[in-house]
Image: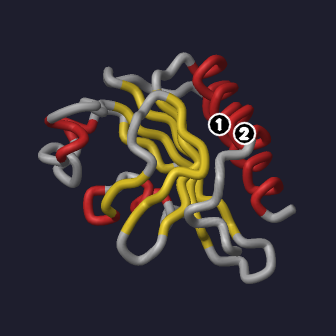
Amino acid sequence: MALLDTAPEERFDRLTKEAVERLKVPISTITILDANREWFKSCQGLDEKEGGRAVSFCGHALLAKSVFIIEDTLEDPRFADNPMVVSVPFIRFYAGVALLNHTTGQPIGVFCVKDTKPRQFNLEETSILLDLANRAEKELNA
């Protein structure tokens, strides 16, 4: 889809900004993944524009069949020693939804939110995340 390493776009930034505001989280990204890295098409709350796939939360969410939620990263053995958990930005909560290429049906990225404290998502918050992810997916495929 030729998305990696493209310039920021307001249409994507609007969605991640909305996620931060409506879900009251410090971090939201639209993340595109390749074999070795995760790259942020849009990012609120982090200075980095990419990271290694080996320590990526989004790499797990990419393969999930529904919303992928980690309520407390320190309580999940897959993430308890993750560099993004034990050091800056100290991620303690993660929720992400895979984004699909409509032509191939393959997952290409993730719409996600992250928090620095453990939390649970209620049905309304999950619905908001799914709506934002659906809107991001439509934009990616436009």
Q: Are marks 2 and 1 in contact (CB under 8 Å)?
A: yes
Q: Amino acid at mark 1?
A: Leu
Q: How was this image coloured? A: secondary structure
The quadrant of the rendering that contains the C terminus is bottom right
Seen at 22% across and 48% down, the residue is 79
The secondary element bearing badge 1 is classed as helix
Q: Amino acid at mark 2?
A: Leu
Residue 38's spot in the image, x, y percent? 43, 60
Q: In terms of depth relative to the viewer, which is nearer, 97 or 139?
A: 139
In the image, 128: left or right of 11?
left
Farthest residue, direction front: 7
Residue 66 appears in the figure: no
Seen at 60% across and 69% down, the residue is 108
The disc label shown at residue 129, or none:
1
Q: In terms of depth relative to the viewer, which is nearer, 115 or 66?
A: 115
Residue 140's spot in the image, x, y percent? 75, 59
Please rate how many residues cluster around mark 2, counting C-alpha atoms within 10 Å: few if below 14, some from 14 to 19, many from 20.
some
Farthest residue, direction bottom: 104
Q: Where does label 2 land, which residue?
A: 132
In the image, 53: left or right of 6?
left
